[in-house]
Amino acid sequence: MAIPVIDFSQLNGEERAMTMAKIANGCEEWGFFQLVNHGIPEELLDRVKRVCSEWYESEREEGFKNSMPVKLLNDFVESKTGEKLENVDWEDVITLLDDNEWPSHSLEFMETMKEYRYELKKLAEKVMEVIDENLGLQKGYIKKVFNSGEENQAFFGTKVSHYPPCPRPELVNGLRAHTDAGGVILLLQDEKVKGLQIFKDGRWIDVEPLPNSIVINTGDQIEVLSNGRYKSVWHRVLATLDGNRRSIASFYNPSLKATIASAPEFKDPVTKEVDQDYPKFVFGDYMSVYVKQKFLPKEPRFQAVGAM
């Protein structure tokens, strides 16, 4: 069993209807799919992978050896107090935004990642338009909901993560199981070191590395907008004994002031009302709940924000 692999270039040809159906299936049945021929130049992707690896080696690798996850794992092994170290991830991570100070002294790193983020944001918006169409929404609906005015633009962040070799991978998570809070997530994952898994049909399934593909998954807000048709999916990263897994995930999320609710297109034809399984809420309120409950089941998060 493997997540769908979809040739995005076929949206522009005779295979458009079939490609749209494949993306709908990826969203509805899997919550994840991989895009190939997505339009981002391979030269840029190769450069992104190189500068991120060089940046980690020069600016982060030594620091991780003295990090809290390493200290906690060492203490856990010595104390032998349980089966697995909880509430910690074996991960080094930074987040890149257009309006914050980037944590790198490398001009090539900054220029390359700004170029990559520009291209990836365009791809995210194309994917959202496909989701609009598959859900029977007006073109640009999701983008409009996520952008709640000129002063409250949608959030687009890029998380550069590395999962270094772990001496006791059976005792700690690379990244604990969770669903993503936001909208559409686009991942450039490591081509050699596996570790990403999704939960489907009662078991964990590997997301196999595919050179220069972009892994797409939908978050909690797409689940709400689609009134549960496109559900966000549990996923995790395993710690590994060998290899330093690189993961570059970008998030197209609503503005914190955006109002999220099931789209009106899901109205019952008789009652003319949306039979909503989800509350209407402001995304910033949802995030205030999510940061405390990220690694817990998502249903109580919807209930909590609905009661606010």
Image (cartoon, rainbow, N blue to C red):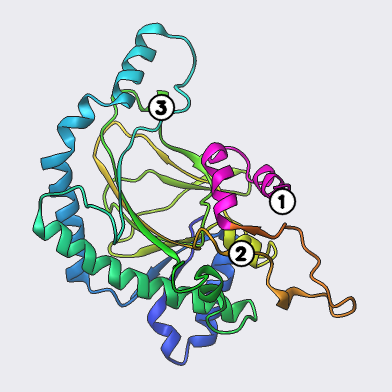
Q: Amino acid at mark 2?
A: Thr
Work out how far the residue at label 2 is from the one at label 3, CA to CA, in angstroms.
37 Å
Mark before the other along the chain sequence, 2 or 3? 3
Bin the neighbour count of mark 2 within 10 Å (Cα to Cα): few under 14, some 14-19, many 20 and up. some
Q: Quadrant of residue 63?
A: top left
Q: Which residue is mark 3?
A: 172
Q: Which x, y percent locates residue 232?
A: 58, 55
Query: Residue lying furthest top in this view?
Result: 79
- Bounds of the magenta segment: 283-308
Q: Which residue is mark 2?
A: 259
Secondary element type, mark 1? helix
Say above or below: 307 vs 66. Answer: below
Q: Main secondary structure of the magenta part?
A: helix
Question: Residue at 49% across / 17% down in the picture?
Answer: 83
Q: Quadrant of residue 249?
A: bottom left
Q: Which x, y percent locates residue 297?
A: 63, 41
Mark before the other along the chain sequence, 1 or 3? 3
Question: Residue at 33% across / 60% down in the picture?
Answer: 210
Secondary element type, mark 3? loop
Q: Which residue is mark 1?
A: 306
